[in-house]
Image (cartoon, rainbow, N blue to C red):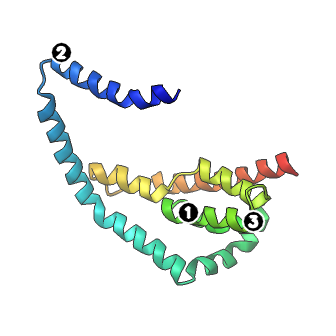
Amino acid sequence: MERISSIILPVIVIFIVAYGALKKLNVFECFVDGAKKGLVTFASLLPVLTALIVAVGMLRGSGGLDLITKLLTPVSKLLGIPVQVLPLCILSPISGSGSLAVFEDILRNYGPDSIAGRVASVIAGSSETTFYTATVYFGSVGVTRTRHTIPSALIADLVNFIVSSLIIRITFT
């Protein structure tokens, strides 16, 4: 298996170059054009992504995350979501790196076999960074009005948090 994984990327590259040559395309020129378009897309997304990273850093550093967690604790208990994973639920739709740091804190403080650790593991493995993904996908094609995408994705995130908690409670208690 290790041998296959080490040769798969070169095989794909060789296949693409051979296919382009077979179709009589200038593969290098196509590659350079694609790289230019990728850099333009990256440059257009950079300000928004920077703002997201700064906002998450400010939220964690200022204690705002702790305040939001305290405010949402009654709702969390009502929905069956462990209070310990609330910071993960808050950051997960916003920032992958922020939610990963919170996930690591949960595992370090409560252990991977605790209810909080298991729920956090399921949430981390089955959720998406909603705002980052919307920024990249919509920003790359210039869409500014996302209509129902963000509310729908946030509802899906909430369902994920509730169902993850429910399944872990049913399975391990």
Q: Is residue 8 visible?
A: yes
Residue, far right? 173
Residue type, label 3: Tyr
Q: Quadrant of residue 162?
A: bottom right
Residue type, label 1: Ser
Residue, far top? 22
Give the structural element (helix, strand or loop) at label 3: helix
Question: In this picture, is 163 found above or below 131?
Answer: above
Gap between marks 3 and 1 measured at Cα: 16 Å
- Residue that appears at 22% across and 24% down: 17
Mark with earlier residue (3, 1)? 1
Mark with earlier residue (2, 3)? 2
| Label 1 with label 2: CB-CB less than 8 Å | no
Mark 2 neighbour density, 10 Å: few (under 14) some (14–19) many (20 or more): few
Give the structural element (helix, strand or loop) at label 1: helix
Q: Describe residue 145's horizontal placement relative to residue 119 as left or right.
A: left
Q: Tell me where residue 61 appears, x and y as whole percent.
A: 52, 81
Which sits in the foreground, 22 or 154? 22
Q: Quadrant of residue 19?
A: top left
Q: Which residue is mark 3?
A: 110
Which sits in the foreground, 18 or 55? 18
Mark with earlier residue (1, 2)? 2
Question: In this picture, is 61 found above or below 53?
Answer: below
In the drawing, what numbered circle is on residue 22? 2
Question: In this picture, is 105 found above or below 153?
Answer: below
Q: Which residue is mark 1?
A: 99
Q: Describe residue 18's horizontal placement relative to residue 120 as left or right.
A: left
| Label 3 with label 1: CB-CB less than 8 Å | no
Q: Tell me where residue 160 appears, x and y as whole percent.
A: 65, 51
Q: Tell me where residue 152 appears, x and y as whole percent.
A: 53, 52
Gap between marks 1 and 2 measured at Cα: 46 Å
